[in-house]
Each structure stands twice: as C-alpha cells, then as structure tokens.
Amino acid sequence: MSLRDAEARSRGAAGPGARLTRVSAALGDAPNLPGTFALAAAGAAACGVDYLKVGLRGLRGEDESLEFLAAVVRAAREASPEVSVIAAAYAEAAAIGSIDPETLPRVAQRAGAQGCLIDTALKDGRTLFDHRDGPATARFIADCRRRGLLCGVAGSLGLRHVPLLVELGPDVVGVRGAICGGGRSGRLDPRRLRSFRAALLGATAGQFGSGSRPRDLSRPPWDPPE
C-alpha cells in the first residue's frame, strides 16, 4: 500500500489521481530573514509539496526564532493549507551560535509548525551522537511528543547507530551518506537503502520480541498500520 493510499483510506477519502508518494522540500539553513523565507515557503507550498523543512541556523534567541518561524508557517499555510512545516535545529548550536535544540519544540509549537528535527550543521565526519548523547536526544523526542509534534533526527547516521535509534524511537530518521554510493554527495544506492531498512526492522524485532507490537519503523508516522 502506498503512503498516500494508506492516508486516504484512514480518512475515508481515497480517490483516483491521488499522489502515490509524499513530497518534501528543504528551504535551506536560514539566516534571520523572515520575509525572504516566508516568500520561499509560499512558493514551495504552492507547488504542492507535503512537507517543508527549514533550518534555523541563523536564529539565536527564542523570540527571534519564533518570529521567523511563525512568518514561514503562516506564508506556507496560506499558499497550501495542507502543508506541514518542519523546523530544524542543530546539534552544534553552541558552537555555531544558533537556537538550542532543547528550545525548538516549544518554538515550533508556538509558531504552529508540525514537527522538529535535530541535524548536524558541520559535515565534518562527526555524527549527531558525537554532539548529543542518547538521554539528551530522548528528552527532545519526549518534548516533541508531549506537544503533538513529529520528531526527527539526522546527522551522519549509519548502521552502527540503528540500535540506539530504535531505542529512542523518533518518528523519522534522516540519512543520506549511509544510503548513497560514494557518501552524501553520491547517488542513492537501493541496496544500501534496503540494508538500512532491514537493520531497523531487525533491531526493532530484537528489542521488542515477537510478543508485542511496537510502532512499525518501516512506516512513516502518517502511514497507519493495516
């Protein structure tokens, strides 16, 4: 079953011509230019994407971040009421002078965004977990859940991180280099993608065993179980 068909069935609104996949767009790592990024968000949303991701790299305080993100969300939703805005903060926030990931869920909720992501800004070989340990990431995920937000993690994640990712249980795991031939700038490798998915499923089965029904990590959070 496709993601779109599953969602439509769950709402009782399946119909011909429904798009078979979800589409996302990344607006980039934003400086504090709310008008510019609001315009970009409106343009991307008007193209029909389902998700818009914006990185709050140039935003420092909570008030500044809230003003910026609220403008982006408002512009995106005016162009397309169904679009979901995902706000990203960075694990190296202290080093690069951007908003702290611990603050992001509160800002996202107040701004009307639908989700949060922690990523790495500096692609220097260090991973998310080189900057933030498991308990800190678990607190972020729990805060997102309390606020009804989707939560994602990314940042040079690989197969060795799968057991911890399954333990933490974010809604979305973002990977690039791990599933591309030649690293993050290479082409998507279907074999690597299948291996990563199989590792997630295997770790989930190993953690929960056959007697329980954990959340299916092979399905995005918007795809209900059959």
Image (cartoon, rainbow, N blue to C red):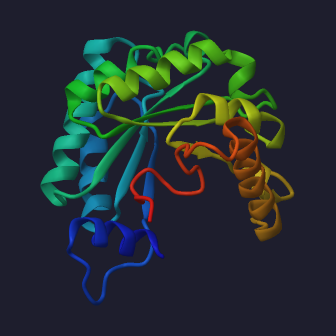
Residue 146 picture quarter: top left
Q: Quadrant of the C terminus?
A: bottom left
Residue 118: x and y in percent read: 53, 30
Residue 35: x and y in percent read: 23, 39
45 left or right of 3 in image: left
Taking depth in this image into account, of 124 and 36 the one nearest to the observer is: 124
Count of marks overlaid on the render: 0
Residue found 16% across the figure and 43% down from its top: 74
Residue 75: x and y in percent read: 18, 47
Q: Is residue 114 above or below residue 185?
A: above
Q: Is residue 199 above or below residue 158?
A: below
Residue 112 picture quarter: top left
Residue 65 shows up from this direction: no
Residue 45: x and y in percent read: 28, 60
Residue 134 picture quarter: top right
Taking depth in this image into account, of 201 and 179 the one nearest to the observer is: 201
| Residue sitting farthest toward the front | 211
100 left or right of 107 in image: right
Taking depth in this image into account, of 197 and 181 the one nearest to the observer is: 197
Residue 17 shows up from this direction: yes
Residue found 68% across the figure and 47% down from its top: 210
